[in-house]
């Protein structure tokens, strides 16, 4: 006698019958489904969120400036143009010039690659260390590893970040943008590590994580497949915010003159304009204002991009915009109609 509920639409006996032969999904169908779920659907979700669209356009503009811009625009040198030319007066130096006769627009463009290098190195260090410490500590809660990692994190949190960075910069006087980014990222990871740990403590109690333990999967596999995959949206959003902090800190250190002036930087421009008396001389204000506007634009783009990614990583929204999940979409539409 069969125990099957007449209202069930799934044949449980057939589902758990190992002798039943299931036809494998064709490779082309799997590739199509993967592209749909990982590329097409997120792009559709992003296009419906103005924050993701505007943030991506702003960051793409900076990317073009840092790649094609430095090729198309000559590296500025002293005497390239008249001294203190006003903005929007000559198309050759649309943003005006400084007291050295260097076009400000060209300086902003040639400062972009170094800024991207600092952001990349700083974000990798701060996010990478925070994710590793938070994952290991949360998954191994109550063990020696957890105690040691959280003790180190608490010690680093108690150290004043800005004075530590200033001392390190004064000692090493780094000229390479990557090294500057690494040093700036050293004090940005403890807070995020604590937050990641708290997230892991809740995820590790989920049934699929417990199933992985029972199946005997290694700790590395569980951390990578079950925990890191769930935390990637959170980590990605925080990486954008960490990049914003790296920008502010690097520009601040260049503006204060703590970092050596060996490359073009928005903070160097502001420092030279301030020392030249731009605050008291209206004809020099453009020298100070345009770097500030550039910093604001990049920060604004990163904030909008991180907020837009909150929608892109929403699983329900992606499923609704995927063309290979028609059944789920129909179910969602049905739910909406019932509501």
Image: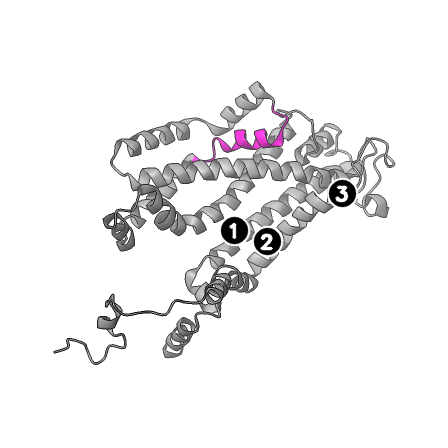
Local packing at callout 3 (Cα closer than 10 Å; few below 14, some 14-19, many 20+) is few
Q: Which residue in the protein does label 2 denote? A: 55
- Residue reaching furthest to the bottom: 6
Residue at x-position 49% and y-position 24%: 164
Residue at x-position 57% and y-position 29%: 179
Residue at x-position 53% and y-position 46%: 240
Which mark, residue 306?
A: 1
- Marks 3,2: beta carbons within 8 A: no
Q: Earlier in the sequence, mark 3 or mark 2?
A: 2
Give whichever of 201, 248 is nearer the camera. Answer: 201
Locate residue 126, reporting x and y percent: 48, 36
Q: Earlier in the sequence, mark 1 or mark 2?
A: 2
Badge 1 element:
helix
Locate residue 293, reporting x and y percent: 67, 44
**In the figure, 218 relative to 35: above or below?**
above
Q: Quadrant of the C terminus?
A: bottom left
Give whichever of 315, 3 is nearer the camera. Answer: 3
Read off the magenta span. 174-189
State the separation of the CA atoms marked 3 and 1: 29 Å
Q: Which residue in the protein does label 3 denote? A: 71
Locate residue 112, reporting x and y percent: 67, 40
Residue at x-position 63% and y-position 55%: 57
């Amino acid at each position: 006698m069969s125990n099957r509920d007449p209202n069930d639409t799934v044949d449980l006996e057939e589902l758990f019958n190992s002798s039943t032969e299931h036809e494998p999904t064709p490779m082309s169908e799997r590739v199509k489904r993967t592209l749909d779920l990982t590329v097409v659907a997120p792009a559709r979700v992003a296009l419906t969120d103005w924050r993701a669209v505007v943030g991506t356009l702003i960051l793409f503009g900076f990317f073009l400036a840092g790649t094609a811009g430095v090729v198309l625009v000559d590296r500025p040198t002293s005497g390239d143009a008249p001294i203190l030319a006003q903005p929007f007066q000559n198309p050759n130096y649309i943003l005006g010039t400084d007291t050295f006769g260097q076009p400000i627009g060209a300086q902003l463009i040639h400062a972009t690659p170094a800024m991207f290098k600092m952001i990349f190195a700083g974000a990798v260090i701060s996010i990478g260390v925070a994710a590793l410490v938070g994952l290991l500590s949360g998954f191994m809660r109550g063990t020696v590893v957890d105690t040691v990692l959280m003790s180190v994190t608490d010690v680093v949190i108690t150290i004043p970040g800005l004075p530590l960075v200033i001392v390190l910069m004064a000692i090493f006087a780094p000229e390479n943008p990557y090294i500057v980014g690494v040093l700036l990222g050293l004090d940005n990871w403890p807070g995020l590590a604590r937050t990641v740990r708290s997230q892991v403590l809740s995820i590790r109690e989920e049934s699929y994580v417990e199933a992985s333990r029972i199946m005997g999967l290694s700790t590395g596999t569980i951390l990578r497949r079950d925990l890191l995959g769930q935390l990637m949206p959170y980590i990605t959003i925080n990486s954008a915010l960490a990049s914003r902090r790296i920008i502010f800190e690097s520009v601040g250190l260049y503006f204060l003159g703590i970092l050596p002036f060996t490359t073009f930087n928005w903070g160097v421009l502001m420092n030279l304009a301030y020392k030249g008396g731009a605050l008291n001389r209206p004809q020099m204000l453009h020298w100070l204002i345009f770097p500030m506007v550039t910093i604001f634009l990049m920060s604004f783009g990163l904030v909008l991009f991180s907020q837009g990614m909150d929608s892109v990583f929403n699983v329900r929204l992606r499923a609704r915009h995927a063309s290979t999940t028609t059944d789920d979409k129909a179910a969602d539409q049905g739910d909406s109609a019932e509501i």
